[in-house]
Amino acid sequence: MGRRRSSPFNTLSVWIRRQSMKVKAFLAVMLMLCSFIALKLFVKDHSYFFIAAEAIHALGIMVLIYKLTTQKTCSGLSLKTQELTAIFLAVRLYCSFIFEADIHTLLDSLTLVSTLWVIYMMRFKLKSTYIKELDNLPLYYVVIPSAILALFIHPYVDHFRLNRMLWAFGVYAESVSVLPQLRLIQNAKMAEPFTAHYVFSLGVERFLGCAYWIIRVIETGGTYLYLIGAGYIWLLMMLLAEIIQTFILADFCYLYIKSVMEGQLLVRVSSPV
C-alpha cells in the first residue's frame, strides 16, 4: 500500500511549497544552521568532514558504475558534468601531490579513475543511450569564468603561481560542475533513481565541505578569513564557492528526500532546480 497523503511529511512538504521564496530561503538557512551546530557539537575532529565528503563522492560514482554495468544505459546522465568532474579532480590531484600527499590524494585518485571509466562508457560503449540534446549547457559557461577567477584570486602560499592558480581553478570548477547535470534534469523534468542518488551524494558532499569552512570561521571568530596575509580574499572566495554549490543542490536534495519519503522512484522536477 502507498503512503497516506495525510502523512506528516506530506503535510509539511505541501506547506513549504506554498510559502514564498523568502520564507523558503529563511527555512533553508535555519535548517543548515541547525545542522552546522549539530556537526560542531558531535564531531570533534572537523577534518573528518573532508574525508567523509570525498568518500561520499566516491560512493556516488560507484552508484553510476552500477547503473552503467547493470542497466547498460547512461540515459539521464550528463557527460559534461562527468568531464568537468574529471577536470577538477585531475587538477586537484596534481596540486595535492605538490602541496601535500595524504588520504585526500588517495580518495581523489580513486574517484578520478572511476569518473574516467564513466566517461569512457558514456562516450564509446553506451553512446547510443546518451541524450545529447538534453545535455545542452556549454562547458565554456563554467570553465572560462572559473579560469578568470583563478587568474586573479588564488591562494598565497610558497609555491609557483601557476600551481596556486590551478588549485583555485579546481575549487571554482568544482563549485559549478554539477550545473550541466541539473540542467539536463530540468530539461527532462525528472531524474531516474540512480542519477538522483548520485546528485544527492554530491549535495551531501558539498554540505560537509561547506560545514567545515563555516565552523572554522566561527571557531576563530572570523579571523580565519584573514590568515596567510593577503590571502584572505582567496579564503573568502573558497568559502563562497562552497556555499554556492550547496545552495545550487539544496532544492534538488529537498525534492529527492520528498520523493524517497513518499515512496516514489523518480524525482520529478516541475521548476528549475
Image (spheres, rainbow, N blue to C red):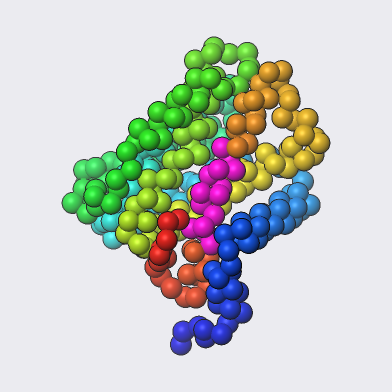
Toward the left, the furthest residue is: 128
The answer to whether one can see residue 204 in this image is yes
Percent coordinates x, y for residue 136 in the rendering: 29, 45
> Does the magenta run of residues contain 247?
yes
Identify the residue at horizontal 78%, vertical 52% (top origin). Answer: 41
Identify the residue at horizontal 28%, vertical 60% (top origin). Answer: 71
Percent coordinates x, y for residue 48 in the rendering: 66, 43
User: What span is colored magenta in the figure?
Assistant: 241-254
Percent coordinates x, y for residue 257 in the rendering: 53, 65
Identify the residue at horizontal 61%, vertical 58% (top origin). Answer: 22
**The image quarter in which residue 209 lies:** top right
Is 97 on the left-hand or right-hand side of 267?
A: right
Tell me: residue 104, above or below residue 147.
Answer: below
The answer to whether one can see residue 55 in this image is no
Near-viewer residue (21 or 48): 21
Near-viewer residue (213 or 187): 187
Percent coordinates x, y for residue 5 in the rendering: 52, 84
